[in-house]
Image (cartoon, grey):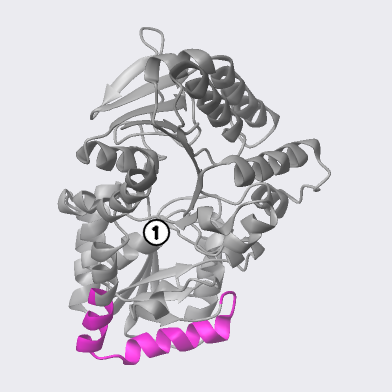
Amino acid sequence: MKILYINHYAGSLTMGMEFRPYYISREFIKHGHSVDIIASDFSHLRTNNPNIKNSKIDEIDGIKYHWIHTFKYNHNGVKRIASMYQFVHKIKRSAKKIAKDINPDVIITSSTYPLDTYAGQKIKKMCKKIHNKDVMLIHEIHDMWPITPMELYGMSKFNPFIMSLQRAENSFCKKSDKVVSILPCAKEYLCEHGMRDDKFHFIPNGINILDWNEKIPLLDEYRKTLEKIKNEGKFILCFFGSHTKSYSLDYLLKALNKKDRDNLFTIFVGGGNYKDELISLAKELDLLEKNVLFFDSIQKKMIPNLLDYCDAIYVGAIKNKMFKYGIGMNKLFDSMMSGKPILYAVEAPNNYIDEFSCGISVPAENVDELSLGIDKLLSLSKDELTTMGQNGRNAVMKKFNYVSIGNEFCKLIEKDGK
């Protein structure tokens, strides 16, 4: 089949995230399908954006990327919103040509926001008119918009942008043939907005296992520091990722300060707008260098070697109303893949730590409970820690990897898409 994947922010290994459309498209190709991705030539998520002066079409690992020129922007704001409408409008304007030239059997609308459903719907209509065939239209949900901007930025439901997003959400609920969600508990909400319950399919986030097989050595400075800590017989707890308030890292520092734990050392690896405040807090609590170290960001392929030195990994998040639909942060799956137990301080209905017995789960934003969770980790035997870690790795190998995710997606389109 010919698959058309519309995702404003789609990336690749050389460009950077978003990675999900790229990885899933590679699995489609392995199953014998062809894939065209329509994406913007600018995304704030990518490390490198394409240069479309010479060509507006690139082929990357068998996937044909069609670039739509849109506004550049620096932060969330009016210009980013304008780029969304510009992207969708340009695709709609070219819908007849896209339908004629690509002639898709399946259309997946997959941008973070729901507006691209209108582009998919128009291309589907043109395929019917030009080729006299019914095309499967799938809407893929990454985040719950318009709820996400309302919760994050306090936007009113009567804001014109939010009202526009709500109309688009209602539209994809009613007019898509299938709705794929990385959030397992969104079904009831979507049904309230017009989706038939049999349209809903949960296909989770995950990792690319090959990334773990292509790991590169850790920086010498970090390796030597970690080896020194290990040689002192200390238990190493690690957080890796962006240092932002959303990951509840201040709660972790306060929990570490609850009591003396001479056998525990915690490392924070990454950058972010909250890092300076965290370092100041660690100094104030007299933890810095004695029990806590902050490392700069490292390359993604160094993470497997970093985690080899660690005994457990911290994954936390602030309390958030949006989590009631479920959570699927990539950081969690990377942590599970490491084969190390996880100290998990997140409140969401899907708790993979409990489901797969791969760590210690405690309530979010609770210093006392987090401190007890740390003590419980420290009390476990080496065999118990190893079993927990292996449980998490087994779950990723079975379910939360892009081969399995791609297979699930292929079953969905191959069953009804021909």
Q: Magenta stretch: residue 386 in it?
A: yes
Q: Residue at x 30, y 90 (%)?
A: 380
Q: Picture coordinates of residue 73 (x, y %)?
A: 59, 27
Q: Quadrant of the N terminus?
A: top left
Q: Provide the residue span drawn in magenta.
A: 364-390
Does 339 appear above or below 245?
Answer: below
Left or right? Give the position of 71 relative to 388: right
Left or right? Give the position of 59 relative to 330: left
Q: Nearer the viewer, residue 32 or 370?
A: 32
* Residue 367 position by quadrant: bottom right
Residue lying furthest top in this view? 54
Q: Quadrant of the C terminus?
A: top left
* Residue 251 position by quadrant: bottom right
**Mark 1 highlights which residue?**
331
Residue lying furthest front in this view? 132
Residue lying furthest right in this view? 158
Q: Picture coordinates of residue 209 (x, y %)?
A: 22, 54
Q: Magenta stretch: residue 337 in it?
A: no
